Image: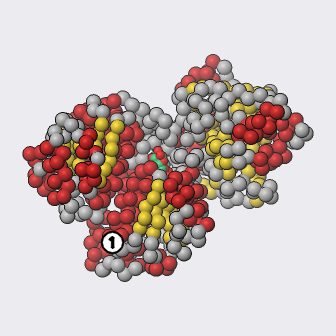
Amino acid sequence: MCGIVGLVGNTAASPRLVEGLRRLEYRGYDSAGIATLSNSKIDICRAEGKLINLEERIKETPLSGNIGIGHTRWATHGAPSVLNAHPHSTKSVAVVHNGIIENFSSLRSMLKAEGHEFISDTDSEVIPKLIHHLLEQGYKPIEAVASALKRLEGAFALGIIFAGHEQLLIGARRGSPLAIGSHEDESFLASDAFAMAPFTRRISYLEEGDWAVLRPGVTEVFDSSDRAVSRTFQETDYNLDIAGKAGYQHFMEKEIHEQPRVIRDTLNTYYNSAAGKIFLPNDNKELEKLDQLSIVACGTSFYAGLTARYWIEGIARVPTIVDIASEFRYLESPLKENGTALFISQSGETADTLAALRFAKSQQQKIVSVVNVTESTMARESNIVMPTRAGIEIGVASTKAFTTQLVTLACFSIALARKRGAISNKEEVRLTNVLESLPELASKVLAQNQSFIEISAELSEVETVLYLGRGSSYPIALEGALKLKEISYIHAEGYAAGEMKHGPIALIEKNTPVIFIAPSGPLFEKTASNIQEAAARGARIILISDKKGITALNELIHIAFEMPEVDEFVAPILYTIPIQLLAYYTAVSRGTDVDQPRNLAKSVTVE
Ligand code: G6P
């Protein structure tokens, strides 16, 4: 999704803006641009496609100046093109924008009637035109921005510079995230702290409705009522070296292989070794009385929620509903008085999940969030924050964020079960030990890396793939299909194995690949029947199971991936790894852009 960066200081802005944009690339984009002030005049360079195109243009026509703004654009209103790329400008003001201005149409008509011309198809172009209009009416730059912000509806994070004002950068946020930072005599803004890491570690995330005036080394923040406010600054610990993929070909591959470590880090966050027990971050009494839980999320995080339902209902015995945020937010569900809603998000900024969280809050729900970015808006607006310890995830397709979400939710289920007296001490110790064994088991699965390459080459030639699973393997089938679609662009469907007969079976013809996620266990026999049914129709059966499962179905299998024997409780976590590897190697075989697949964004900050 769009990313913005801005800086005001005493050294050349252009190369550093590009460096900041490079660190925003992972969010997903299809054009990019920067603007600087040289000799007090606005200079702009924009390019369609990847950052390299922008860099080439800058090489041809360098931009000077020590103040500037930059943008990576993920097209919403208007195709990816140079004209639609940001910054948008007039001769007096240039703006970068992340979000959607919902009243752009009426603003545009008003400004057109005043004689302003529009050259792009974007909603964003109304912002510089509106500010320019106010400047023409005699407003000073800061007043013009304060006044313009009041007329904008929708979501935005903004970076704004003005011709003739080489020491003035303004940022603003409503709905979309924005961080500011400073270091010695320079000040910065960006969509996230990671983009600013080469320049400063001292950052502050603006609060909803805040706007900030940045001058070299000085930052001032105002709230939505234009009152000067003080916001806390913190030191971030982001690793500067993102160029290094630690010998892997892609970030996604690196992130898949980081899973044993980040699973361990996440477990350590919740496991108290002195007590030998798992605890939640705040010992919250109200969870004891919880009689229903609503889990809400988007994308891969939603599948983590679906998986968690098996644990929360099965182990903690709490009735649970799981919903997609973009639906939940408009359902106006009658939520139980003083109930609890749990939101799952890697970024903590997904627009629909955040809106759903705010809806739940307005219904007096206690808010629990499972987030990877602990400085995120969702984390800040939650009563209980359960961090995942995945570290920064660069690959757009989520991998280690998902498995660490699962680990966190598994810990949540155990702690919740104990609070509610739904679990015996013996069972708690057993489940905790099973969780503890995960990092080692994950390493074992990753060591079989090579065996996924061959079948992936085969999969890369097909048009459609079915993923089937039962029980807690069902959400993993959904996640498997999503991963394949996202990065290899092959059509894939995930289904509950028991539902196969109600539709997807019609897709099966000779050699259709059907991937079964089927650890041996209580539901294995049922899935085995579905495998028979698919095989009888000529499907190419790809089975992910343990030795016992594979031996039982040997005759029917085209290819099998042998997994270590594992307790049913953690099977969905471990069985995620092979479906990630399958998707990854299939995409590599097809030569797609694995880390930044077409049309996708890492953090979806628009509806
Ligand atoms: C986008 C990403 C997915 C992610 C989803 C939800 O679609 O590409 O990887 O699962 O958003 O994001 P969140 O940050 O809320 O987990």
Instruction: Single out the residue that lies furthest toward the top.
Output: 60
Closest to the observer, 459 or 440: 459
Above-or-below relation of 452 to 500: above
Which residue does the image show at 41% across and 67% down from the upper left?
Answer: 320
Snapshot quadrant of residue 142: top right
Above-or-below relation of 591 to 144: above
Closest to the observer, 231 or 481: 481
Snapshot quadrant of residue 301: bottom left
Snapshot quadrant of residue 145: top right
Label 1 element class: loop
Q: State the image coordinates of residue 600 (x, y, percent, origin top left).
A: 48, 39
Regarding residue 440, the answer to whether it shows in the image is: no
Q: Amino acid at mark 1?
A: Ile
> Can you identify the residue that label 1 sits on?
315
Q: Is mark 1 within 8 Å of ligand 1?
A: no
Instruction: Single out the residue that lies furthest toward the left.
Output: 555
Q: Residues within 10 Å of mark 1 (few under 14, many from 20)?
A: many
Q: State the image coordinates of residue 385 (x, y, percent, origin top left).
A: 52, 65
- Position of 284 with respect to 187 (left or right) is left
- Position of 451 with respect to 12 (left or right) is left
Which residue does the image show at 24% across and 45% down from the upper left?
Answer: 505
- Position of 353 with respect to 552 (left or right) is right
Q: State the image coordinates of residue 192 (x, y, percent, origin top left).
A: 59, 47
Q: How many marks?
A: 1
Which residue does the image show at 26% across and 40% down from the upper left?
Answer: 507
Above-or-below relation of 221 to 272: above
